[in-house]
Image (cartoon, rainbow, N blue to C red):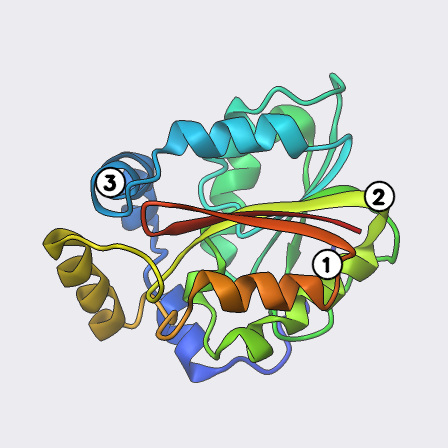
Amino acid sequence: MPDHPGVIDPLIQRAQQAYTPARLAVYDALVLGLFCSLVWRCPRRSMVRLYERAAGAAHLDIGPGTGYFLDRCRFPVPDPRITLLDLSAECLQASARRLARYRPRTCRANLLEPLPLPSGHFDSVAMNLVLHTVPGGWDAKGVVFGEVARVLRPGGTLFGTTVLAEGVRMNALTRRLLAEQHRRGNFQNQGDGPDGLARALREHFPVSRVVVRGSVAVFRATA
């Protein structure tokens, strides 16, 4: 697929700078292992289970990272049709290489622009550990939910997780490292709480659910 990054917010560009090849090399152990379990208190095994329960035969992964979760997912069919979408060329290359056995398609795009994908095409869409890197409140971030609803077939599923900054219990370690992520520009989730996420999902999906685990929102919605 051709690249369609559109106009990129400087805050998004800054967050993308974290995904260098060197950092991606330690991403699974550091971010998905240490941070998810000890800092955000939502272990990666919970996210693997979310994939296995919700991923369909035609799947779009928005923000695939290193491809860790897709690599471990047991899909309902032996040959799922996978599309990887990200603004980071490094993430797309790393995840596509890891998932080469599925021959995934890749699409470089900006989430805050219309997605260059066909309507009603996917059985499932994942946004795992993505939304906390997108600037703006839920009204701004909710734009992507409208696009996801468009590319899902009727009855298709959106699922994912995002780190919250409001409305959740945090220990001293979580508060300190969240502030550090804000300072570095890696996270853009200031003001993000579970109620705002639930409201944004309801605007675009007839059925949705948000569950808080640690400082992470686990969400699922049906088109």
Residue count near mark 1 (Cα–Cα under 10 Å), binned few <14, some 14–19, many ≥20: many
Q: Is residue 2 visible?
A: no
Q: Which mark is residue 30?
A: 3
Which residue is tagged 2?
Answer: 155
- Measured along the vertical axis of the image, is residue 53 above or below residue 34? above
Q: Which mark is residue 148?
A: 1
- Measured along the vertical axis of the image, is residue 196 above or below residue 123? below
The label nearer to you, 3 versus 1, is 1
Q: Residue at the spot x=58%, y=32% of the render?
A: 51
Which x, y percent locates residue 92?
A: 54, 49
Which x, y percent locates residue 159?
A: 61, 45
Q: Label 1 sits on what residue type?
A: Val
Instruction: Specify whether 10 is left or right of 221.
Output: left
Q: Label 3 sits on what residue type?
A: Leu
Secondary structure state at the residue bearing disc 1: helix
Instruction: Specify whether 123 is left or right of 41.
Output: right
